Amino acid sequence: MPALIQVRSPQSSSPSQLRLGKGQTLIGRGQGCGLRLNDQGVSRDHGAFSYYIGVLVVEDHDSTNGIFVNGTKVKRQVLYTGDRVTVGPIEIYIQKGSAASPPDAA
């Protein structure tokens, strides 16, 4: 089952949804990015989502402005349903994330 994200940009009046299949989806302004975010606060190669064996991860590619998960700057982070990823001014909501529960959810 693919991961599902919702992207909310200040430049768009309505959010868009994207399914993330197995493998890596690049995030950035560059032409080759699977999630292309056209904003100056986003680097050309900002980072990537990786989805393998039911685990969704976001990774920063040494971008200028970083990637934040639930308000905390991260280099690499496993994502769960309900998490919020911020890339520049764009918010990405994880609607279906990693299959396992976060460690403190018990």
Image: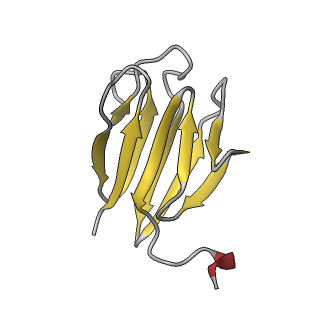
Give the residue drawn at x 66%, y 23%. Answer: 64
**Residue lying at 29% horizontally and 57% vertically, measured from the top left:** 21
| The furthest residue to the front | 13
Residue at figure coordinates x 56%, y 19% from the top left: 41
Q: Residue 31: which quarter of the image?
A: top left
In the picture, the quarter occupied by the C terminus is bottom right
Above or below 31: residue 19: below
Q: Nearer the viewer, residue 8 or 78?
A: 8
Expressed as whole percent of the image width and height from the top left, the position of residue 11 reads 39, 19
**Residue 102 in the image: x percent, y percent?**
60, 74
Colour scheme: secondary structure
- Horizontal and vertical percent position of residue 19: 28, 52
Closer to us: 68 or 82: 82
Task: Check the image and name the residue furthest to the bottom.
Answer: 106
Answer above or below: position of 65 versus 34. Answer: above
In this rendering, the count of numbered labels is 0
Query: Residue at (57%, 27%) from the top-left corner?
Result: 88
Q: Nearer the viewer, residue 26 or 7?
A: 7
- Quadrant location of the N terminus in the rendered image: bottom left
Q: Is residue 10 left or right of residue 105?
A: left
Q: At which x and y percent is residue 53? A: 40, 72
Q: Is residue 19 above or below residue 12?
A: below
In-image side of 13 versus 58 (left or right):
left
